[in-house]
Image (spheres, rainbow, N blue to C red):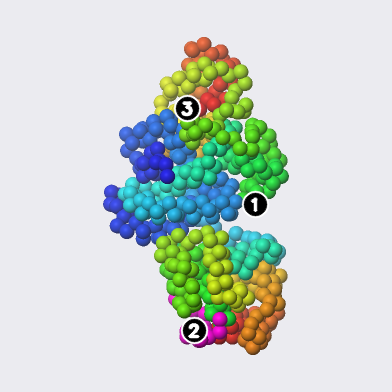
Amino acid sequence: MSAPQIEPELLAAFLDGAASPAERESVLRTIAASKDAYAEFLEASAIRRELEAGEAHTAQEPPGAEPPTDIATRRGRPRYLAPLAMLAAASAVFVVFRNTPASDAGVLTIAQSTRIAGATGSGSLSRVLGAQWDEPGWSVTRGAAPTRESSARAFRSGVRFAQLEVAVNASDSSAVTSAVGQLQELLNDVLGSAPLSARLDVLGKTGAFGTPSDRSEIAQQLKLMLDDEAWFDLGVWAGSAQLAAKSGQDLFFAADGVAMTQLTQLSTRKFEPAELWSSVSEPVRALAAGEWRASGDREALLEAIRQILNAAAG
Amino acid sequence: MTAAGVPIADPQRAFVEHLPVIERVISVIARRHALSSTDADDFGSWARTRIIDSDYAAFRKFAGRSSMSTYLSVVLGHLFLDYRNSVWGRWRPSVAATRLGPVGVRLEGLLHRDGYTLREAIEVLRSAGVEQSDVELARMAAKLPLRQSTTEVPLEVVDGTPHEADPAGTEPGGGEDDFAILRSAINELSAEDQVLMRMRFWDDISVADISRTLRIDQKPLYRRIEAIELKLRALLTERGVDRERARDLLSSEVAW
């Protein structure tokens, strides 16, 4: 790494107007004489201006203002989702679900696009969604035991991976650590999983959560390790859906949106063992068909997702 | 926030706590330089790794003399310039591209470093959220000098400065002597005047933004800039550069 031309803190103090007159003059002399110093000054001052402009813009937004819109929003919000939107507004909780085109949206992209508005920083997901935010509602021991079906383990891992992605999006280091711990526990007695577990450890401990593509690669390795791609993907979908529903996100469940399209596509994949799928397929079908919409409240939606989680987690 | 003069006790924790600020700054840098989402992710990952690998030196050194967000703007801005140099290798943007700003530099990189067609380059910029219209981007491209797809400069002259050996970077008819005279005239200005002239005429930064950045009253700044320009012209005339040539030199691309 090259050494900065001006001590970073001195340049920052200069930009904040906190440098002494002598320091100010010295900074100006360096900037005037050195192209590199000028480039660093110009870059930092432009970033600072944009940050300030962004803060001013945020400050001008009325409380409860909508997050940036996307294509799905512009299409208009289905009327049946109004109660959900009102719930979200009442609790000042918004999820920014970026509805990416179906063609390039793998199931993991759905998790990576799910953001809980208002959740930023360590512990924020607990604060915004409640201490039980990552509690899927399944049995703590069922499905995780080594003797259980690999399908249940893959499904649970998918759910935890979705929670990891949402935690990363919120820069919530404690939630990331917790999700990583849950994933490692699921991998505990999987043969040859130590390197992957160590890789997850890096995510959890350093606070450098990696890029989305890094994490996609980890997810891919997980799927290979667990040897059950379809169940893992369904887990990712269900984990993302549960958090979206808990926070009153409506776009996620738009009938023609990417997430619901993905669910329909997922349901056509081959799930084994067939007996397990037979108990999961019905709640999946009911959710995809939007049967919960008849009652129009969030509890019905959460219950529909819970049925999938309970049935698939073994 | 640490009290001024008191070092941060736990730099790792400070890093984790300030990750949201770091992410915000990275996203500003990505937008400003029209990075694709992949490039933005790569840079973000690279920058965070640099901070961690240095044992959080950026946080250990911070003594609270500025706001953390300004400090991180400086640190990450410097890291971005480093990152760009490491990714670009010996390729340097032309003076013309530099003068067009970060989008101009990115456009030139796509066209002349990466070998994209104009249509492809525009699509990349569009996906990175660049606001300029296709026509504006095409006009920008037309201002860029024709270069080989990989323009390399000898290692001995690599210093992070724009590549000047191109037609658009040199004022037609501009002799080396004239530029030397201009540079000596500029050197007679105070450091602050040099900086604000460069910001205004080279980087086309608005007087309002210069005023905010350098913390100089905006109202008198207009007259001050005019006065500096007049002074420079006078200095050039004293040195035998005629009025018209002086005006050309002051608006030339290598003046600053």
Q: What amino acid type is highlighted by mark number 1?
A: Ser
Residue marked by disc 1:
B127
Label 3 marks which chain's residue? Answer: B
Please give the label number shown on residue A52: none
Same chain for mark 3 and mark 2? The answer is no
Q: Chain of mark 1?
A: B
B189, above or below B111, in the image: above
Badge 2 amino acid: Pro
Q: Position of residue B154 (x, y in %)?
A: 52, 32
Query: Where is mark 3, residue-wise?
Result: B224
Residues packed near mark 1 inside 10 Å, few (<14), some (14 to 19) or many (20 plus): few
Foreground tag (3 vs 1): 1
Quadrant of image for the N terminus of chain B: bottom left
* Residue shown at 47% from the left, 31% from the top: B156
Tag 2 residue: A146
Mark 3: amino acid = Arg
Query: Which contiguous range is marked in magenta?
Result: A125-150
Q: In front: mark 3 or mark 2?
A: 2
